[in-house]
Image (cartoon, coloured by chain):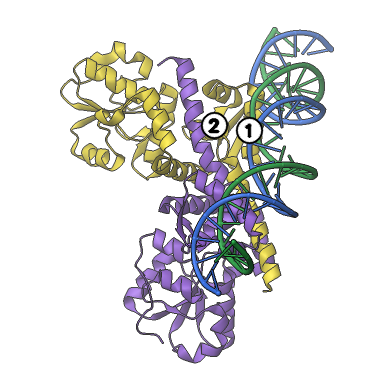
Chain colours: A purple, B yellow, C green, D blue
Amino acid sequence: MKPSTKREFKARLFGEFARIGKVFASPHRLQLIEVLAQGERTVEQLAEDVGSPVANVSQHLQVLRTARLVAVRRDGLYAHYSLADPRVFRVWQAMRDLGEARLAEIDAVVTEYLGNRSDMDAVNAAELRRRLKSGDVTVLDVRPRREYEAGHIRGARNVPFDELAERLRDLPPEVEIVAYCRGPYCVFADEAVAALRAKGYRARRLTEGYPDWRSRGFPVEIGTAADFK
Amino acid sequence: MKPSTKREFKARLFGEFARIGKVFASPHRLQLIEVLAQGERTVEQLAEDVGSPVANVSQHLQVLRTARLVAVRRDGLYAHYSLADPRVFRVWQAMRDLGEARLAEIDAVVTEYLGNRSDMDAVNAAELRRRLKSGDVTVLDVRPRREYEAGHIRGARNVPFDELAERLRDLPPEVEIVAYCRGPYCVFADEAVAALRAKGYRARRLTEGYPDWRSRGFPVEIGTAADFK
DNA sequence: ACTATATTCAATAACCTTGTTGAATACAAA
DNA sequence: TTTGTATTCAACAAGGTTATTGAATATAGT
């Protein structure tokens, strides 16, 4: 192949890949991806979740759709969006890892809003998995019921964050609790751990969230767990 | 945490992550990352490799540097750039996987320039690794000597592509040859396989390139292999 | 048909990104 | 000090991206 042809080939090839990169270059779209990683959502729900006008969200969804990273299911008036491929989440995960490792600014923002999290003594996924097998841990999913039912860590119990205060009695007081929610920066898990500790429970948070657990191929479960009312 | 504070937190946090995304949103920068994955390079060498003016490359390198994805080592007149973290390559890898899976355009471009590659019967990394253990294969690194010496698949022999024709006699004719170069779209490996087959060798290409092999944690080797002159 | 609602489209202005050009800087050798 | 060389900087024009706004479209229920 001639060098000039090769240049042209590389230019076109990398041009296509850069289309993927552009999708991940907007804070708004990253937020949408994070939410969609929990399960499908209508445009309105997404707008509510990320706090933007519907038209704006719709516009970003078109960008995601043009790059074929999301799928739409239309049902009456509603358009239900979802991630078209688990690889979309993997790219976001890789970016997250890179950012955490390289950008001091990220640590600064997290510390500013969430404080020093090292005393939270977070459990990583591999460790939780081992402990799940031995059974000496209560796994607590503090996401909304709908998200829990769309998929959760196998064996996890669901107490949505805003019901936690009233339902403390449902939790066995002797077993250590590991709380998780949408992702590593989801605030609810941090706050749940703080609330549980204040009531005398032993509680820690999972470092990551449900989509990360699933993405690792660890065991998940769909629907309502039978053992918990 | 108040919902409004939470919004602000998310906005700032995802804003930081989007900085990472922006770096990967330009075809030129993706090419630079691909080259830098082979080892460190001066600005001039990069400009030569990607076929852009030096000032343009320098400008893109500043973008990479601002996001702290590359490191610079200054030595006299020269600035030697390298990837600051293996996670940079992992993001690119994840994007590549996603693009290959979702964008038909990528397949179209590859087919247009490289033809139908299915008859190339490419070997994947896991398979090659197994066969390396049993030893019934010659692994051929067709990259320039300098890149080979900076790191290669353990046991691979180096015959730079433009010396291949003259050095065919160095290759044992009975053993199957697996050729690789910089990455899955590196043209040299395809052309080497074609050339070898034309001369009667049994030859296939490795699906990916050296950086991918290393990124998987498969065995590598640095410097000149002793067994090959 | 009419109304309400979810979503998308179109237009715009503000802003950001890119390639190009030529100059500035920094180091090394003569 | 002078000269040559590698790299970076600065300025600019061309083009691309984004949030906002209001209108258009499409579907469901009345």
Q: Is residue B74 left or right of residue B38?
A: right
Q: Which mark is residue A168?
A: none
Q: Which mark is residue B60?
A: 1
Circle nearer the N terminus (1, 2): 2
Discs 1, 2 touching: Cβ within 8 Å: yes
Q: Is residue B109 left or right of residue B168?
A: right
Q: Which mark is residue B32?
A: 2
Q: Is residue B56 left or right of residue B201?
A: right
Mark 1 belongs to chain:
B
Identify the image quadrant of the C terminus of chain B: top left
Mark pair 1, 2: CA separation? 9 Å
Q: Could you classify mark 2 by the number of other residues whose Cα lies within 10 Å: few (under 14), some (14-19), or many (20 or more)?
A: many
Furthest-bottom residue in this view = A169
Image coordinates of residue B205 in percent, x first then y, are: 29, 29
Identify the image quadrant of the N terminus of chain B: bottom right
Q: Is residue B42 left or right of residue B192?
A: right
Q: Please determine if labels 1 and 2 lie on a single subunit.
A: yes
Residue B4 versus residue B17 in the image, above or below: below
Q: Could you classify mark 1 by the number of other residues whose Cα lies within 10 Å: few (under 14), some (14-19), or many (20 or more)?
A: some
Residue B1 versus residue A98 in the image, above or below: below
Q: Amino acid at mark 2?
A: Leu
Q: Amino acid at mark 1?
A: His
